[in-house]
Amino acid sequence: MPRVDLMLAKEDCNQCPIRHRAVCATCDGPELDRLASMKSYRSWKAGETIVLEGDALPFVASIVTGCATLTRSMEDGRMQMVGLLLPSDFVGRPGRVAAPYEVVAVTDVTMCMFDRPAFEKMMSETPHVAHRLLEMSLDELDAARDWMLVLGRKTAREKVATLLSIVLRRASTAARPLRADLPLTREAMATYLGLTIETVSRQISALRKDGIIRLEGTRGVLCDDLSALLIEAGDDDDGDFLD
Amino acid sequence: MPRVDLMLAKEDCNQCPIRHRAVCATCDGPELDRLASMKSYRSWKAGETIVLEGDALPFVASIVTGCATLTRSMEDGRMQMVGLLLPSDFVGRPGRVAAPYEVVAVTDVTMCMFDRPAFEKMMSETPHVAHRLLEMSLDELDAARDWMLVLGRKTAREKVATLLSIVLRRASTAARPLRADLPLTREAMATYLGLTIETVSRQISALRKDGIIRLEGTRGVLCDDLSALLIEAGDDDDGDFLD
DNA sequence: GGTGCGACTTGATGTGTATCAAATGTCGTG
DNA sequence: CACGACATTTGATACACATCAAGTCGCACC
């Protein structure tokens, strides 16, 4: 679900008020100037609820810093995480008000908020912004569909390995072994993977015992051989980059 | 996943070459005329594969008639349906070539195909088309996220009841009892729900024995009390419409 | 009306994950 | 450093769904 390309795009674009290169990669400035007045920033602490499920979503916003989750839940308390919001991701939508999911800050989060009607007007007048938003939501759609395969068909071990491989890939530098700090608690991981906390914990322990990963404290993960992890994840190991 | 609002929008729009009101609801014609030459129609028989997973997707198209499925699969043969294409839905995307899923015709299918570069040019020049496509993909995204809750957290009985309620709602007229013909085989249902054929069959039988639904042959489903079915599905029964 | 084949149903059994219940680890705070 | 609260791990058991294996039904075709 989290995607490397968007993570890499979080630097500011100084040429337009949206301030995210992911959105305004082709922006040439003046046409958007009038938007500056409608933009405002707002922050939440880690753990705070940003939007309740079913509440109005009276804004359009993009994440500037931090990480938030989208979660849908059933009346009896069962919950399923349905998305991760990372810097440069958008939340809220033109023309719709009720949120079909709860938005919660995982880390401290800052968002850039736009007035809805003004945002819609801008979209209709600046095609490249609408076009970029379309691309971004199609990426999200593909990611959601990938995740449906994980939820519907993978075993617990494969699910956990998949999540770890995503985190490790995103955090990857040239350095070996790969190392990452899990941004999610075991509970959040379970909510994401359609499992229970206990099963997530057991599978992480099993992967450690089998020498696929190593742990550093409770959050740090190390991996010497990503392709071995990818095999556990049930993915092709003809990955995007060579070791 | 299938959505009523799009199903209702399959009539032709005679004012523009896209020919689907879902896409061109606000279209006023002349600006799009030049597109007529790039448009062509193509048909597939029920059961035929339209696009192989990983193959190039050298077109942008919208469904005119029929029903197709999007399926992702793993090397060992496990499969997960990740989307349904119904009339007025779009497939293919600007800027991307490889399909991350297999597209298969469930019934006979006719699509309206567009040349990719020309389609992209039109999008950048006619904001309302891009805007409508954005809305459609955000709807798809919400539907995909709903389905993640089904796949990750619902029991087999709830999954089957959810699918049946969707089909019955879509087919619903004023008439009672509600009646629908399942467009999918048990195998396709299993692929959609993240279950096996046998489990789907057992749950349908159980719902019948419990008086929630009745069957007509192997494909017809009747339901006297939709709210009872919705309870089995684990959904709120404060539905969108009153009985 | 019989025949054959695929779709579907039903049964018996096994396994993976949830559930319930401690024990252990970790980190902030006094 | 000790304490408490909470996150995590580990263990024992239960149960839902998968798997394997026969049936049965429905329908096209001869």
Image: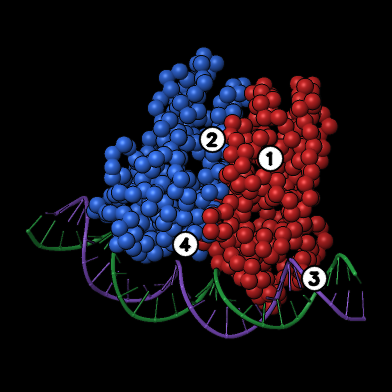
Chain colours: A blue, B red, C purple, D green
Q: Which residue bears the numbered disc 4? A: A155
> Which residue is at a point 72% across and 47% down the rendered structure image?
B86
Give how far apart the Cα atoms at labels 4 and 1 are. Answer: 32 Å
Q: Quadrant of the C terminus of chain B?
A: bottom right
Label 1 secondary element: strand
Tell me what residue is drawn at x 74 percent, y 54 percent.
B47
Q: Specify whether disc 1 shares its chain with disc 2.
A: no
Of labels 4 and 3, the one closer to you: 4
Q: Residue at x 64, y 68 (%)?
A: B197
Residue B60 lies in quadrant: top right
Badge number at residue A136: 2
Q: Which residue is mark 1?
A: B90
Question: Is residue A150 depicted above or below B224 in this figure?
Answer: above
Rendered location of residue A192, percent (x, y):
45, 54
Q: Which residue is mark 3?
A: B217
Of the numbered discs 2 and 4, the one sitting upstream in the chain is 2
The amino acid type of the residue labelled 3 equals Gly
- Judging from the image, mark 4 belongs to the subunit labelled A
- Visible residue check, residue B47: yes
Going by the numbered disc 1, the residue's amino acid type is Phe
Identify the chain of the residue marked 3, using the numbered disc in the image: B
Left/right placement of residue B119 relative to residue A28 reads: right
Q: Quadrant of residue B122?
A: top right
Q: Closer to the N terminus: mark 3 or mark 1?
A: 1
